[in-house]
Amino acid sequence: MIGGAMRVKIVIARLVTVILVVSVSRVGSTVTNSTSDCDAVQNFFRMKDIVAVGIRAPQISAGNVCGTTSCCNSALEEKFLNKSRTNVDGFVKESLLRLSTILETRAKRFDEFFRELMENSKKEFHEMFKRTYGVIYLQNSFVFTDFFQELENYYATGRNRLSDVLDQFFGLLYQRMFVVINGQYTFSEDYLQCVNEHMVELGPFGDVPHKLGVQLRRAFVATRAFHRALVVGADVVKKAAYAYPGADAECAASMTRMKYCATCQGYIPPPATCSAFCIHTLKYCMKTLDVLDKQWDLYVDALDKVGDRLLGPFNIEMVVEPINIKISEAVMNFQENGAEVSQRVFTGCGKPVVNRRRRDVKSFENTTSENITISSNSSVEVNNNNSTATSTSTTEITLQTLKFNNDNNSSNNGKKKRKKVMESTTESGNEPSLDKLIKDIKQKVKDSRRFWTHLPYQFCNSEQDIAGPSVNATCWNGTAIGPFSATETNVRPPYSEIQNLPFTLQTIVTKLQAAFQGQDVDLADEDAEEPILQESGSGSGDYDDLEIEGSGYQPVNPGVTEKVPSGVTQPPEPPPPIIPKEDESNVYTPKVTASAASLHKTLLHFLLPLVFAWFGGLLSDLLQL
């Protein structure tokens, strides 16, 4: 009996020893509700620069987030909840604004490149036409400057259709050239209206309006759609950043359990958080942003395809740079067929009235100091300080390049300057070439594919103490060390402005898809920037009521409707005709170069009818004496 009692005592003593050993060994990793254990938790928080005022005493109840065995009371848990909200909200806003800035910066670079391209094209156009057509061009330059202005207005606002812009331009150019070629006649407004009605059937410019129109429309529509898509995309992301409602109570509580509850329960140092637990928590916190995921990927794909078009058949550089050559080709077509066109117009509209009074040629040069004289041997001399154009017979005219006092740069200097600008835009890192710029934009946009889906993963990857995906059994799952099992929650996020943003993306995606197909889509929008206005120097007076300061871009009052100039003082011009749209199935690729022979041909065909008309008027006056 005595021996049996001793054995029982020994067993009991061993059990007590085991319990004590287990309790002591747990102190290193887990604390109980004793004051000394919670002091250890407080010291750990202080080492982490966390003010741990709120470590509870044994007689104070724990908070509601980390459980009854937690050393953190409700006051400290409230601090952790606020810190968790700030952490999530800050990450979301910073990530979204970073993407918005990337898109906004690329949109600005693309816009600057386009405007510089248009500015260079206008200068090149002016220099070429001035040295080719001389004072005739200078007197009628408003036709071309207004055309460039309308192209820029379309890019800026999308409020006018390119087909209408081209119809108005070639209609007004047709009027001006017809009047100049037939300068010995006087035309009434009714007669010029009849002239306009015959333009389509006569086709004085050949197929240039159709071919140029197809290329301009496709390139400008794609260019504007590409730029507007970048602006809209940046705006959508920025609105989402500021409309994000923030972490709700459940999100903050789950974040607190993920980051702080292990320490509050006495795990010092705390174990790594399960990766699945972190991702599940952040997906819930960012659930409001899920509505953007599908439309954003469609937006990325559509923008990428339009970028490919701009690198290929819709390249805006290949259309804008040689536009002077193409319009000059149209002018030459009219000159070659000028006599035939005039006779057909006279047949359809009747013979115009001959100007009885000798035509004052200086009416076309009232802005220059040139004097035109005709000698007895039919020699024509155009006298200027630096230019002459002479002919020794009526069948052969020797033409020289016209130069004017107000020309600060010669043609060679213009070419050198153009070459220098193009080299800088190609080689300089600050001004990349169009291809390089578009490729950079395409890559940045493609990098944002599945952006909204990847946000929770990016957050967890940026956090410390997150276990790898393969570590699942020995990580913190929110309540203990062990595998994390997700619990699906069907909580609908609260309504916010973010739920309207997918419709904005859907609208721009539709326009991008149409631009990719080469369609003349309606790209006007309410928040589009105002049209830009530059001083054209046309002398028509149509813009006299608008302020133009310097030579930079100036916004126009959106309530003012821009009108096509009606012409110079002599002779009066009717409104430009509206030409029916032509078949746009044929695509034309312009050539960038023009030979010197074509320039002489241009001068010959343009000035010869003017000389004969002036000479015919002189003979008519002599016969009446």
Image (cartoon, rainbow, N blue to C red):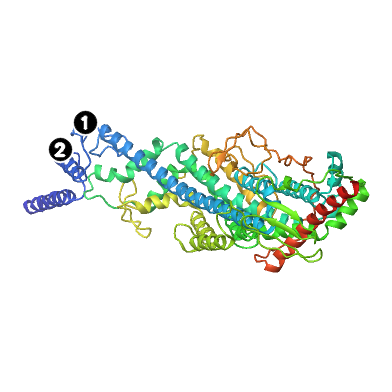
Q: In this view of the protein, can residue 207 be seen by the observer?
A: no
Contact check, label 2 and label 1, Cβ < 8 Å = no
Q: CA distance from mark 2 to mark 1?
A: 11 Å
Of 126 and 482, nearer the camera is 126
The disc, 2 or 1, on the residue closer to the chain's N-terminal end is 2
Of 496 and 227, nearer the camera is 227
Considering only vertical position in the picture, is 188 above or below 609? above
Q: Secondary structure at mark 1?
A: loop
Q: In this view of the protein, can residue 340 be seen by the observer?
A: yes
Q: Which mark is residue 320?
A: none
Q: Which mark is residue 35?
A: 2
Considering only vertical position in the picture, is 241 above or below 117? above
For badge 2, the amino acid type reads Thr
Residue depicted at 39% across the width and 35% down the height: 249
Can you give x and y, in whole percent of width and height, for residue 500 in the image? Answer: 56, 38
For badge 1, the amino acid type reads Ile
Can you give x and y, in whole percent of width and height, for residue 105 in the image? Answer: 47, 50
Can you give x and y, in whole percent of width and height, for residue 405 in the image? Answer: 59, 52
Rate crowding at label 2 as few (under 14), some (14 to 19) or many (20 or more) other CA atoms within 10 Å: some
Residue depicted at 65% across the width and 64% down the height: 592
Quarter assignment of residue 255: top left
Q: Secondary structure at mark 2?
A: helix
Left or right of 317 in this view: 469: left
Of 584 and 130, nearer the camera is 130
Left or right of 490 in this view: 367: right
Can you give x and y, in whole percent of width and height, for residue 54 in the image? Answer: 22, 34
Per the image, the residue denoted by label 1 is: 60
Rate crowding at label 1 as few (under 14), some (14 to 19) or many (20 or more) other CA atoms within 10 Å: few
Query: In the rendered picture of this protein, how many numbered marks are placed on residues?
Result: 2
